Image (cartoon, rainbow, N blue to C red):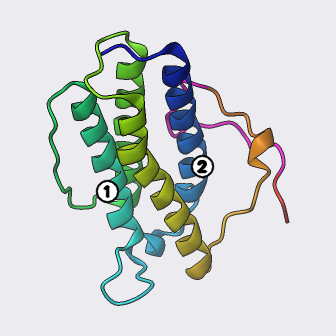
């Protein structure tokens, strides 16, 4: 299935935006944050991040036409963050490769990508509740670049106090 160029471009830019925002949500978190639980039965940040990695393993399997889901047990925080960014980058690299994609951009967005965006927001809120907030930012001015989906992101341009 061939993506329209504009759909592919927007989806890949969304992945870069997610990497930028998720990077901000996970970087510099105190060690105890991984196991913070906002309420009994609520997922911990480490469980959320593991799920986010699983979402992009799933997205890649959907793109390849071989849907496969797994629930991963969380790794240590830094290892889980690395796994998430590796899965996100593998998915983005596949989209950029020109290989056939077995799902539409719209379906990939509405499933794994939108879910990961929501979970990034959850991590940000949990950081605040846990007493380790991140600084707000004018994301319109952020240096987000298609293809930059790893943990290494540019320095924020306009954060708020």
Among all residues in the image, which is located at the extreme top? 98
Q: Secondary structure at mark 1?
A: helix
Observer-nearest residue: 77 or 5? 5
Q: Is residue 91 left or right of residue 16?
A: left
How many numbered markers are drawn? Answer: 2
- What residue is shown with label 2? 21
* Quadrant in which residue 40 is drawn: bottom left
**Residue count near mark 2 (Cα–Cα under 10 Å), binned few <14, some 14–19, many ≥20:** many
* Residue appearing at x 50%, y 30% in the figure: 11
Q: Is residue 46 left or right of residue 158?
A: left
* Residue appearing at x 75%, y 40% in the figure: 142
Give the residues drawn in magenta, as a range: 146-158
Q: Secondary structure at mark 2?
A: helix
Q: Position of residue 113 (x, y in %)?
A: 43, 44
Is residue 105 covered in magenta?
A: no
Q: Position of residue 3 (x, y in %)?
A: 41, 17
Observer-nearest residue: 98 or 130? 98
Report the quarter where the N terminus lies.
Answer: top left
* Residue appearing at x 50%, y 36% in the figure: 15
- What residue is shown with label 1? 50
Marks 2,1: beta carbons within 8 A? no
Report the quarter where the C terminus lies.
Answer: bottom right
Query: Which secondary structure class fits the magenta region best?
Result: loop
Q: Is residue 138 left or right of residue 117?
A: right
Q: Is residue 125 above or below residue 90?
A: below
* Quadrant in which residue 109 is drawn: top left
Mark 2 and mark 1 lie on one chain; the one further toward the N terminus is 2
């Amino acid at each position: 299935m061939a993506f329209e160029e504009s759909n592919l471009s927007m989806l890949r830019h969304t992945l870069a935006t997610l990497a930028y925002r998720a990077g901000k949500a996970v970087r510099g978190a105190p060690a105890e944050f991984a196991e913070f639980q906002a309420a009994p039965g609520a997922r911990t940040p480490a469980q959320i991040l593991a799920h986010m990695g699983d979402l992009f393993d799933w997205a890649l399997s959907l793109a390849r036409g071989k849907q496969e889901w797994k629930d991963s047990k969380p790794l240590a925080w830094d290892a889980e963050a690395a796994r998430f960014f590796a899965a996100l980058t593998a998915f983005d690299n596949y989209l950029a490769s020109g290989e056939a994609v077995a799902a539409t951009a719209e379906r990939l967005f509405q499933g794994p990508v939108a879910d990961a965006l929501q979970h990034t927001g959850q991590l940000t809120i949990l950081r605040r509740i846990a007493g380790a907030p991140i600084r707000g930012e004018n994301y319109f001015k952020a240096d987000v670049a298609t293809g930059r989906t790893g943990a290494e992101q540019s320095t924020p341009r306009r954060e708020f106090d």
